[in-house]
Image (spheres, helix red, strand yellow):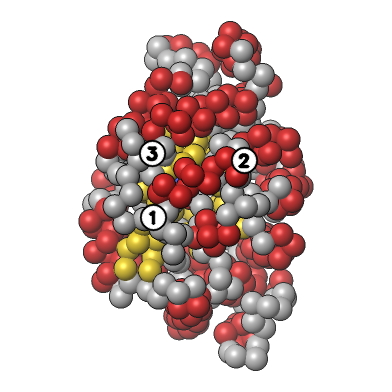
Amino acid sequence: MSDERVDLPTPAIPDRHVVSEGLPSPERMRAALDRMTTPGGTGPSDTPDVSDVEVLLAARGDELVRLRAAAADMRDAGLVAAGRPGQITYSRKVFIPLTRLCRDRCHYCTFVTVPGRLARAGQGAYLEIDEVVEIARQGARLGCKEALFTLGDRPEDRWPAAREWLDARGYTSTIDYVRAAAAAVLAQTGLLPHANPGVMTVEEMRTLKTVAPSMGMMLETTSRRLFEEKGQAHFGSPDKDPAVRLRVLDDAGRVRIPFTTGILVGIGETRRDRAESILAIGAVHRRHGHIQEVIVQNFRAKPDTAMRGTPDAELDEFLAAIAVSRLVLGPDMRVQAPPNLVSEQECRDLIDSGVDDWGGVSPLTPDHVNPERPWPNLDVLAEITAACGHTLTERITAQPPYVLAGPPWIDDGLLDDVAALADPLTGLAGAGTRVHA
Ligand SMILES: O=c1nc2n(C[C@H](O)[C@H](O)[C@H](O)CO)c3cc(O)ccc3cc-2c(=O)[nH]1
Ligand SMILES: C[C@H]1O[C@@H](n2cnc3c(N)ncnc32)[C@H](O)[C@@H]1O
Ligand code: SF4
């Protein structure tokens, strides 16, 4: 089981990334709960008060039970309204780490590497096209329908080795190479690319939209302190400036991209930061209607990172973050939490807190961002989901409403590729559809 094995003991060094916060008074908590969970209170159509959201993120004990039950009820009502009661989705995917070089240096990240290390391991700056297609081909044989491109941000700005690799092959930038690699996967295997390359310009988004039915970038947090203060998680990572990330979310809406975003819980942000981050995602979605899913991801400490001594997000804190995200974002939002970052028992807790999507799960490739956390077997995930009274259902990379809407959300040039894998009535993965590898 994922829980027992893999967590190496973390050294108990004093830690600047942990914020210790008190709990609100029971009266204050009850008032916030009443406003957020009773009919006629602040529903998803109104903007909740940031202080209420902050208070609810501290729910514990009976109050947390009540908060999570309200969130689970809202999720259930949303799935009924969407015409698929009880269905919790996942996307069968392969993970393609196109490059691990990055111009940022997030303190929690173990995905990122440096040219010296790559050279010692005999690896290139980027995966070659034929390596990428081979991963997709193997995934296709296992029924995968998504190729997730996750990579470091703009490594050519920092590393000559990255610039030289691109130049030698005639690519103008990392994003230009993502476009080429995604096009090759699409043409040669039919897997649908989901692009997660970090910060993008509007032009880059327009380009990638022709090869990827959906894209994403975690907001992570709106906290400026984590970005500006030396020693904090995002210090020295220009692409983690909250203003830049909020700009990307807005641009993605203008370009009409079905877009995935989310928050990372437990990287030194306060509950106030978390409340503001959730509300910011709600606000950008109200402006454009493009946020196809919101990932609530718990930070997992990695032994070889600067944040190795930071305790993993406490489970109650994490469950409250999920439930509050659901209540703030409403019944129509897909709220995703990865099933490999908690134990199997805790997966049930995620469902009982209002989650309705497990995200991408792979029968082939590891989660390269959290390589020490294997995916649950898909049969086990189906059992866990069923034990909570729900049905595990396969989707494709873009969420059903965007698949069903087609243009302008899905590029004209991708309509046939999407139709080949989607069920025309539900917009989920079609029964019996397979890619052609
Ligand atoms: O395996 C992972 N997949 C991650 N995914 C992929 C995600 O699970 C699916 O690809 C999407 O749900 C689309 O199906 C992300 C996608 C984004 O757009 C933004 C962030 C992430 C983060 C992760 C991650 O840490 N690990
Ligand atoms: C791809 C996404 O993975 C998340 N990410 C990066 N490092 C970690 C970690 N140690 N634990 C959990 N999530 C992480 C970030 O939110 C990033 O945007
Ligand atoms: S989290 Fe993304 S941006 Fe930050 S160092 Fe890792 S790869 Fe780079």
Upstream in sequence: badge 3 or badge 1: 3
| Residue drawn at point x = 43 percent, y = 15 percent | 123
Up the image or down, 131 lies above or below 406; here it is: above
Amino acid type at circle 3 is Val
- The answer to whether mark 3 and mark 1 are in CB contact below 8 A is no
Give how far across and how far down residue 286 sits, in percent: 71, 65
Element type at mark 2:
helix
Element type at mark 3:
strand
- Front residue of 88 and 352: 88
Query: What whole-number distance in Å separates the C-alpha atoms at marks 1 and 2?
Result: 20 Å
Residue named by callout 3: 94
Upstream in sequence: badge 2 or badge 3: 3
Q: Which mark is residue 209?
A: 2
Callout 3 environment at 10 Å: few (<14), some (14 to 19), or many (20+)? Answer: many
Residue named by callout 1: 429
- Front residue of 155 and 287: 287
Q: Tell whether 223 sits left or right of 421.
A: right
